[in-house]
Image: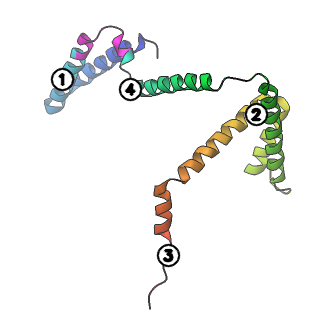
Amino acid sequence: MRPDAAPTIRAQLITAMEQRAARLDGEARRVLEERLADLRAQDADEPAGACANASPARPLRELLDLLAGEDTAARNAYPEVPALAGFRALWSTLRADSQLRQTVAHTPADAGPLNSTALASRAIALMRDLSPAYLRSFLAYVDDLAWLEQIGSESPASASGAAKRTRRKPRT
């Protein structure tokens, strides 16, 4: 978001609330007038650039900054080894080819034109032909998602939930 966009959005909100309050009577109008007074007071109290800093995404930004700082420390602890660059590229290419072979092997021979497995196989084969670098990036992303899904399914809550779902034999 641009730094000057937040004040514009707040001004538009105030204008819209003023128009709505003008059409209402009674308790609804009183509630809107109180909210408008609060918004105007906040608008007057904050400096011009403060609205951009008070975004709801600020905690996420702070977390990202913290992680970026730790990443820098980790990079200093484990420096890049230029000799490994070729190995990483070769490994990435071999992994992409291996995953492509697995995908094609699992495609049914008699799949119809709208079979999701066949469509995914064709899409991956086209990615390999058109942009092998994109395919490697895409497969790394899919691997990350699969890893996150696996981590999420191994939580203690899911393990206890599985134990609760098992059926016992009825006593006779």
Disc assigned to residue 56:
4
Mark carried by residue 136: 2
Is the magenta region chiefly helix, strand or loop? helix
Percent x, y of residue 71: 56, 25
Q: Nearer the viewer, residue 11 or 135?
A: 135
Q: Which residue is mark 3?
A: 167
User: Mark 1, mark 2: which one is toward the viewer?
Assistant: 2
Determine whether the residue tagged by mark 4 lies in a helix, strand or loop. loop
Boundaries of the magenta span: 42-52
Is 17 rendered above or below residue 105? Answer: above
* Secondary element type, mark 3: loop
Q: Determine if the magenta segment contains residue 139.
A: no
Alpha-carbon distance for marks 1 and 4? 24 Å
Disc 3 and disc 2 in contact, CB within 8 angstroms = no
Q: Which residue is mark 1?
A: 33
The numbered mark, 3 or 1, whose residue comes first in the sequence reads 1
Question: How far apart are the alpha carbons under marks 3 and 1?
Answer: 58 Å
* Comparing labels 4 and 2, the label whose residue is closer to the camera: 2
Residue at (80% x, 29% y) in the render: 89
> Whole-Å distance between the Cαs marked 3 and 2?
44 Å
